[in-house]
Amino acid sequence: MLKDHAYIAFSSLRKRFLRTSLTMLGIFIGIASVVALISLGQGMQDAINAQFASVGTDKIIVQGATGGFSPPGQNTAGIVDKHDLKLVSQVSGVKRAAGRLFRSAKVDYADGSEILFTASIPEENEGRELVIEANNIKTAEGRLLKPGDRKKLMVGNNLWTKDKFPKKVVIGSKLMVNGAQFEVVGLLHKIGAGRDDAIMMNEDDARDVLGEPEQYSAVIAQIDAGEIPSNVADRILRALRRDRHQKEGFEDATISTSEELINSVNTILGVVRAVFIGIAAISLFVGGIGIMNTMYASVLERTRDIGIMKAIGARNSDVLLIFLLESGLLGAIGGAIGVLIGIGLSKIVETISREALGSALQPAFPPYLIVGALLFSFTIGVISGVLPARQASKLPPVEALRSD
Amino acid sequence: MIELFKLAIKNVGKRKKRSALTILGIFIGISAVVALISLGQGLQQTINAQFEKVGADKIMLQPKETGLGDMNSPGVFKNQELGAVKKTHGVQDATACLSGAGQIQFNNVQRTHYIMSVPETPEEIKLSNSFHAMEAETGRLLTHKDKKKAVIGYNLGNKKTFGKNIKTSEKIIVNGETFEVVGVLKRIGEPFMDNVIMLPESDARLALKTPNTFQMMLVQAEKNTNPETVAERIEKTLRKERHQKNGKEDFTVQTSTNIIESFNKVLVIVQVVFAGIAAISLLVGAIGIANTMFTSVLERTREIGIMKAIGAKNSDVLWLFLMESGLIGLTGGTIGVIIGAGISKSVELFANSTYGTGTITAVYPAYLIFGALLFSALIGTISGVLPARRAAKLKPVDALRHE
């Protein structure tokens, strides 16, 4: 029974090929843009999450109180220093902790001069392992810094893969950092998050060239397995408060867990995505109106057909079903083409971004996106068809037969 | 021609439901585009007005940094460098300021805010105030005689940042020292300046523990000089001062024109992206028009045959259908412009009541309104070309036979 209905719906669509394809064009443009935007947004989120995954959710970052719009460890009101590092590492629930110093430094090499982000690597092994693990630091060439290395440094990926300096930076290159000569011992893999333009050196060297004897920009702590990050963060804050004789609410340090960081980044990304997709979805709505229009025209044209169908015994529900199937089919086919084109579009963006930026924006096509888009376009079709289909099913057979 | 036009209006009116749906498709797209552009333009105008207040004759010097906002980067300025800049040919006056985060206490609440210094001679204060486009909303701005006085950003006086608003003559504690608030700034619309604490330079140096460097230098070029040329001269002066070769500076020199241009570039890109995505729905709407017109041609095949039989030329039929589709586009466009203007106006009202007046103003330049109307009529006409040509080319005999 349903098969017959579907057959009638399908063949009537085929008969009006031009109109059907124009209507579907409307739907598939909308679906294609939504699919492309979602898959690119999802890809971006996956990339960011992967970056955070290497950090893990068991890290806590302690820094001076920030004013709200500056990156970690910069322009903070309060400070953290060597004394605080010791304090943090003794808080119960903290497995290990490390201090890091971040500053800008002037780097000269082969007639080129750049202001670069300079980061310190802890001198002692435990902290060093934590920093290397949390930041996913790996060498592509050469070696990682060792404890006791003096005037040696590792350079971020962009510094040796892109032409930052007039001459290529290689293992053994001599760089002047704030006037002191350093030798490159390691070329790093891509890390992301601004660290690819950084140079890294042992803490004592960094303190020397940056003129910063005691302070850290941030202290990073890893918690014991089984501890809840926010509980440990509270304990650290309490320890700092006691040590600094501060009242609750008057601390000059900010403590954030890596979980919070991930959540806040995802929230921002989610809002951006929602805005883009919302605007693109307007075109889907317009496409839906197109379907409704086509269906009304179709009802009008086939008034006589409907009369005959009813005269030979079709019930109202049969007519309703045929027209709903027709409009649903319009939506679904448009959606299927739209999904294909959307995938193609985001693949093109991927290729362009690889050519232009060197790093690809990898789009993701989770099953929910594809199945969801198909289902959604079918639903749009059916909904847009409801009014015209009802109009068709309610036609009195006698009058329908009389129409021409 | 007028007869044709009347006929076109009648035809669009006859098929009310279909015409209405087609028009709906167009006006949704047009209203989205109009709303987005009018808000984007409004944003751009606010920023441009801000820069106009600053004036094109200003030059700003900043240390080069890594984009991380490091205020201790090696390129910070020293007192004698300010002197050297002042003596540079074409410089009317110059001043410098320092800034950094501080702990502010008020009403038993502590927050971290940025502190910025105000210079301590009347001429330099004038330059600094005009560069930041600062005006007092209540109270007054700082003068060179002030000690232990502060002026606070708009949000601190209006947004209950500390649980309640800070008013003039109230006391705040900045990094442990007590200051009297003498003025609240007008809203500037930039988070940094709207949350700032302005202190006299010597007080700011103590609070920020920065004894002798500046994070920013501001220069006013002399009248009748080209700010670009003066900027180049300043760059040369500082390079000599620091013994740095061309291209190896650790500082940047930008004229206010440079700054606004880079701002505008970003804004234009954002507008293009948003309006571009919204325009997709216009494309879909246009397809809807084409579809309606094809249906219309099909339905009226017989009518077309009769028209031709009684002497209508191909061009008459073509024009009739083009006018019909253009009319659908134009009507959709008109409604769209009105609704789009309404949407952006409500966004403006909502944003201003939530975030304070002047957050965003929707503007409706004539080119936007006329452009949108013209564009929608054009879209309608173009979508009608194929169906209209099909109608015009129908053979009268075949058309008459059709039922």
Image: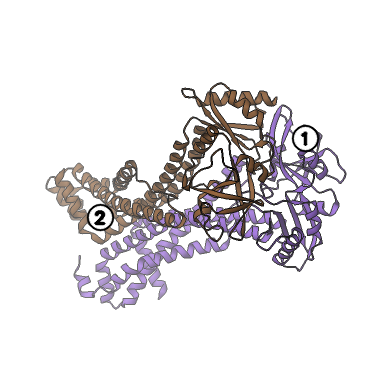
Q: Look at discs 1 and 2 and give the one toward the viewer.
A: 1
Q: Is residue A264 left or right of residue B54?
A: right
Q: Give the label on residue A170, or none.
A: 1
Depicted A391 relative to depicted A205: above or below: below
Which of the two residues, B299 or B291, is positioned nearer the viewer here? B291
Q: Quadrant of the N terminus of chain B?
A: top left
Q: Quadrant of the C terminus of chain B?
A: bottom left
What is the display colour for chain A? purple
**Residue sitting farthest toward the left:** B310
* Residue, disc 2: B296
Where is residue B176? Give x, y as percent. 67, 52
What kind of colouring is applied to the model shown? by chain
Q: Amino acid at mark 2?
A: Ser
Q: CA distance from mark 1 to mark 2?
A: 71 Å
**Residue sitting farthest toward the right:** A148
Name the element at disc 1. loop
Depicted A184 relative to depicted A230: above or below: above
Where is residue B401? Give x, y as percent. 18, 55
- Mark 1 Cα-neighbour bin, 10 Å: few <14, some 14–19, many ≥20: some
